Every structure is written in structure tokens, then in C-alpha cells.
Amino acid sequence: MDDAARGRSGLARIRCVAVKAPAVERDPLELQIRERPVPAHVGIIMDGNGRWAEERGLPRLEGHREGSNSVREVTRTARRIGLQALTLYAFSAQNWSRPADEVAGLMDLLREYLESERKEILENGIRLDAVGELDRLPGFVRAPLEAVREASARNRGMVLTLALSYGGQEEIAAAAESLIERARAGTLPPGPLDVETFASALWTHGLPPVDLVIRTSGETRVSNFMLWQSAYAEFIFVDTLWPEFRARQFLEAVLEYQQRERRFGLTSAQLPK
Ligand code: FPP
């Protein structure tokens, strides 16, 4: 550095150069989607990680790893277009029966995700939550999960819920059990049990009903995901494997949802124009 570049102190002078912030390129589809109501709550069955890896001669875990990049991109997009809630089926109650090394790898990946995404979750006003038999998770996943949950508890942006060790039937059975306990303890008002009271005992209480369920990888099953909450959901099944399901594919699914007529048991003519 020459002398001219130094101040009297001898320290390098700070040169002020106007740097134009790089324009963030937005998919035009995103603007189109923002013109109409978006689903309040989207649930995603993230399927096809294993096949994505196998097609490339990679270990299955590499598919899950690439799948966490899709998680990041879809979460960012969902928040930007204004979803209230996004629920991701990250590990089912039945997934514990997979080979031990895959289960261990998935748990490591979840811990990594919770640690690496903490900053972005907090900076973007996202509230992180989890549903499922969380006490079955290893301590090294539960600890960062609880930490991000607590740190983000007052955030009012989108709620990102991870379904972990989750099963819809298990959730409904647990809700029934807790209501029976309340009835025994005399804290449940007597009389017929209505839908709202039952829903309040579910792990997802407080979340809006699921408007749209997306399943990737060409499978057309529900696989024990949000059985109660998706009673009136629209379902979109796409052939794309989860590691290749990114912002564009998510936006396309939301656009398809926006083109459907939701009747909730009414006739077309009864719907508000
Ligand atoms: C199903 O694909 C996917 C899973 C059982 C795990 C999903 C996990 C992730 C997307 C990554 C970690 C999650 C987060 C939130 C960071 P599969 O293995 O059944 O695929 P296959 O049907 O092709 O075998």
C-alpha cells in the first residue's frame, strides 16, 4: 500500500465506494402468486431422498443431506409469499424401523440443521415448533430443538413445524387419551365431545387446518401425515424427488392450489363470488 492510501496515523484510509446491492432475482411466478390468497398452512411429505441418492450411486444419507437444502429453500419461499404455517414431515413414527445407520444419520442431520438454521430462523421472525413423540428423540436433537423453539417462541412470522417421530394415528390416540384423563380428573366439561374440543387436544393445537398437502416423488399415499388436520386439504402429488423440489416447484404447487375451487361440502353456487 502506498503512502497516499494511508492517513496520518499510518492506518489504511477507508475508501468509500458506492456498492450497488445485488438485485435479488425473484421468480415472476412469485409475484403472480402474491396477487391471490395463499394457503394458510401447507404440509409437505418430503419423499424421494433415498431414490435421488441411489440414482447417483450415493449413500442414501446423501439424499437426505441434499434434501435439507430443499428444506431451506422451500422454507424461505414459503415465508416470503406469506404462509402462516409450514409443516414438514421430517421423520415418521414408523421411520425408527429403518436401518440403524440411516436413523443415526438422519438424527445427526437434524441436529446440524437446527444448529445451522437457528440464525436464519430468528432473523426472519420464524417460530420453530415440533410435533410428534419428541421424547423418543436423542438428547443431542432434543437440546438444539428446545433451544430454537424457546428462542423463537415470541416470533410472529410463519410457524415452521417439524413433524418428528410423528404419526397421525399416534397423535389422535394421544389426544383421545389426554381427553379421557381430563374427563377422569373432572376438568373436561361433561356433554358431547365436539370437533373443536378434540382438535384442542392434538399436538398441532393452535395451528390453522392444513389447506394444502404436497407429496413429492410420485407416491400417492398419505402415510400417516396430518390425518385430522388435512380433512379438507387439497392434495398435490408431484413426481419430483424431494432433493430436486426447490422454490420453483413449490411455487408451481401453490399456483395449482390457487386454481382449485374449495367447496368444504357446499355447492359451487353457494360459494362467495
Ligand atoms: C423420505 O424419503 C424422507 C425422509 C424419511 C426424511 C426426510 C428428511 C429430510 C428431508 C432431511 C432432514 C430434515 C430436515 C428438517 C433438515 P425416503 O428416504 O423415504 O426416500 P425413498 O422413498 O426414495 O427411499
Image (spheres, grey):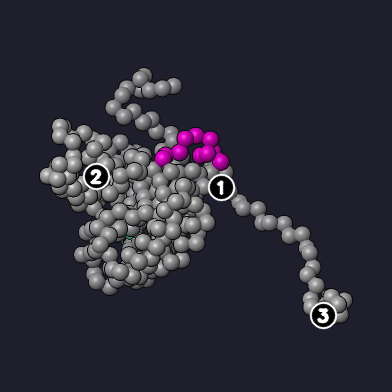
- For residue 201, the mark is 2
In the rendering, at what x and y percent does residue 246 appear? Answer: 46, 54
**Res 13 → quadrant:** bottom right
Residue 191 or residue 185, whichever sits in front = 185
Q: Which one is earlier in the sequence, the residue at label 3 or at label 2?
A: 3
Pointer 2 with pointer 1, Cβ within 8 A: no
Q: Amino acid at mark 3?
A: Gly
Q: Secondary structure at mark 3?
A: loop
x 24%, y 63%: residue: 136
x 27%, y 60%: residue: 134
Ligand 1 is in which quadrant of the figure? bottom left
**Res 180 → quadrant:** top left
Q: Main secondary structure of the magenta part?
A: loop
In the rendering, at what x and y percent does residue 99 appear? Answer: 24, 69
- For residue 245, the mark is none
Q: Secondary structure at mark 2?
A: loop
x 52%, y 47%: residue: 80
* Residue depth check, mark 2 versus mark 1: number of the one nearer the observer: 2
Q: Residues within 10 Å of mark 3 (few under 14, many from 20)?
A: few
Query: What's the magenta region?
Result: 31-40
Residue 4 sits above or below residue 134 on the image:
below
- For residue 10, the mark is 3
Name the residue beneath numbered marker 1: 27
In the rendering, at what x and y percent does residue 45 appear? Answer: 33, 52
Q: Is residue 243 visible?
A: no
